[in-house]
Amino acid sequence: MSTKSKNADELKKTVKEKYSQISEQSADFNASSCCGSGSSSDEVYNIMTDDYSEVEGYNADADLGLGCGLPTQFAKIKEGDTVIDLGSGAGNDCFVARHETGASGKVLGIDFAEPMIAKARKNAEKLNFNNVEFRSGDIEEMPVSDNLADVIVSNCVLNLVPNKQQVFSEIFRVLKPGGHFSISDIVLLGELPEALKEDAEMYAGCVAGAIQKEQYLGYIEEQGFENIRLQKEKVITLPDDILSRYLSEEKIEDFKNGDTGIYSITVFAQKPGGEEEGKVTSATEAEAACCRPDCC
């Protein structure tokens, strides 16, 4: 069944089933595919993922190779903060966030795949972290109260959700006034070939569910967030051995030479109000947060 013919509930079911399987796959396999989808490549390693190995708080057991950025690196997390990770998987970004919050903070991971929750809880127990919690739930209806979080992070998850506007609405609700988010995700410039858009594997693989970059940023602005900025942007290149499963050689060349671009972006935005309002506004600070050659 194609993604077009599926409704939102069916797409969620597809993603939940796929990510339950992915929880048992190796990080190497996931990193050489599109977010752990069945289309693994022999041509290139780390199609989407960034290297966490030098990030403080990193835990290899919790890294399934499913991300497309390093949102916690840009999230300006402070000691004592309450942090929520949307689509927390095996807990990797939660444990990095916990390094920043320290023992006085609180980190909550939300995921709707029960095998992922179970894996993350085991990892937290091994690390003896009493202030890291993993909660089963849908990020379109977060199982948390209003105005709870200082910071929200997410890594290559919102592209999997059919109703992205609702997720940003929930993020706005759950953040404290003056709180902010840093989210890494996949977006598009131009239209994907129909064969890619129609395939459920590519939807679970973070590609077919991606929307236009302008539309994505527009949803954030529509919710009333302020200080919206791109903290990082990089091109995602799908290797030929994956594309060949969907496209002829001629269409692969057309796609590669066309106007369509697949990008990983890390975007920051802030909820108005609170003591933090206006603290992260200067152009100088924005440039300081984006200092490497692969940043925008």
Image (tube, helix red, strand yellow):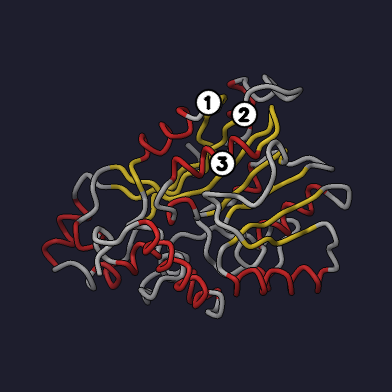
Q: Residues within 10 Å of mark 2 (few under 14, many from 20)?
A: many
- Amino acid type indicated by mark 2: Lys
Where residue 192 is drawn, which disc sits there?
none
- Amino acid type indicated by mark 1: Gly
| Residue 128 coordinates in the image, percent (x, y) | 85, 68
CA–CA distance in space, label 1 to label 3: 12 Å
Q: Earlier in the sequence, mark 1 or mark 3?
A: 3
Residue positioned 79% across, 53% down in the render: 99
Task: State if disc 3 and disc 1 touch (CB < 8 Å).
Answer: no
Q: Earlier in the sequence, mark 2 or mark 3?
A: 3
Task: State if disc 2 and disc 1 touch (CB < 8 Å).
Answer: yes
Describe residue 115's horizontal placement relative to residue 276 as left or right. left
- Amino acid type indicated by mark 3: Glu
Q: Which residue is mark 3?
A: 170
| Image-quadrant location for residue 212 | top left
Q: Which residue is mark 2?
A: 271
Can you say which quadrant of the picture contains the N terminus?
bottom left
Q: Residues within 10 Å of mark 3 (few under 14, many from 20)?
A: some
Describe residue 224's horizontal placement relative to residue 187 as left or right. right
Q: Which residue is mark 1?
A: 224
